[in-house]
Amino acid sequence: MEAFKVRSTLLLIISFALCLIACEGDDLKKVSAISAKKITLSKDRSYGVEVIYSDSAKVKAKGFAPILDKVTPSQGLAYSEMPKGVKIDFYDENLKSKGSIKSDYAINKETEKLTIFRKNVVVVSANMTFTTDELIWDENKRMYFSPAGTLTTKDGNIVNGTSFSAPQDFSTYNIVLPSAEAYLKGGLTQ
């Protein structure tokens, strides 16, 4: 790992030197302005990553990401990015599926204890399916939050709304300004 960082730094210095040689006039001023900001970024990429989360030697969840980038900026906090999406399956004590989350993109801000799922986010649990463009997992609060989305209950009712929130097991949920399509058994009575 250390050799990789040394090679990356050496490659960066050589590339910068070649850019200086190739630059003329105004281009040289642009390179100087960019290099003055001293922005560096280190990215470690892994393919086909599977993570198993367990508690007291019991598997609670399995996650899979086709690509996982560990990003370390020179300034700011490190984070993990899943540019090709992620799928997480949750399990009960008997290793039976309790639900899942999948999205086309995700970012984990480990220091802040936040995971943000974006693009075609689908949450499936025992009592509902929730679809949205963004879902945030706040590990400190053990809650999920979304600015808006569509919830479909197991009996076919559809609820659209804003400010979705749910505990980590999705056993309950809260939606602000809901609008719904509901299916009633037995028809209407007056």
Image: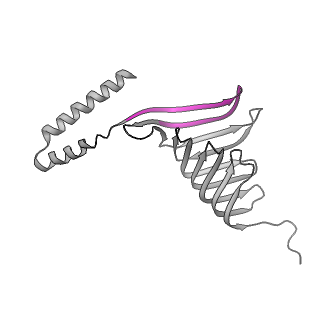
Quadrant containing the C terminus is bottom right
Question: What span is colored magenta in the figure?
Answer: 42-68
Residue at (68, 39) in percent of width and height: 90
Q: Is residue 30 toward the left or the right of residue 41 in the image?
A: left
Quadrant containing the N terminus is top left
Which color scheme does this rendered protein use?
one colour
User: Furthest residue to the top?
Assistant: 3
Pinpoint residue 12: horizontal percent, then vertical percent: 26, 33
* Most common SS among magenta residues: strand
* In magenta segment, residue 156: no
User: Furthest residue to the left?
Assistant: 25
Pinpoint residue 72: horizontal percent, then vertical percent: 41, 36
- Residue 170 position (above or below residue 179): above
Residue at (68, 48) in percent of width and height: 124
Pinpoint residue 67: horizontal percent, then vertical percent: 48, 37
- Occupied quadrant, residue 99: top right
Residue at (59, 31) in percent of width and height: 51
Q: Nearer the viewer, residue 49 or 117?
A: 117
Q: Is residue 5 toward the left or the right of residue 18 in the image?
A: right
Count how many numbered circles sit on residues in the image.
0
Q: Is residue 94 toward the left or the right of residue 68 in the image?
A: right
- Occupied quadrant, residue 158: bottom right
Q: Nearer the viewer, residue 159 or 139?
A: 139
- Residue 61 position (above or below residue 187): above
* In magenta segment, residue 47: yes
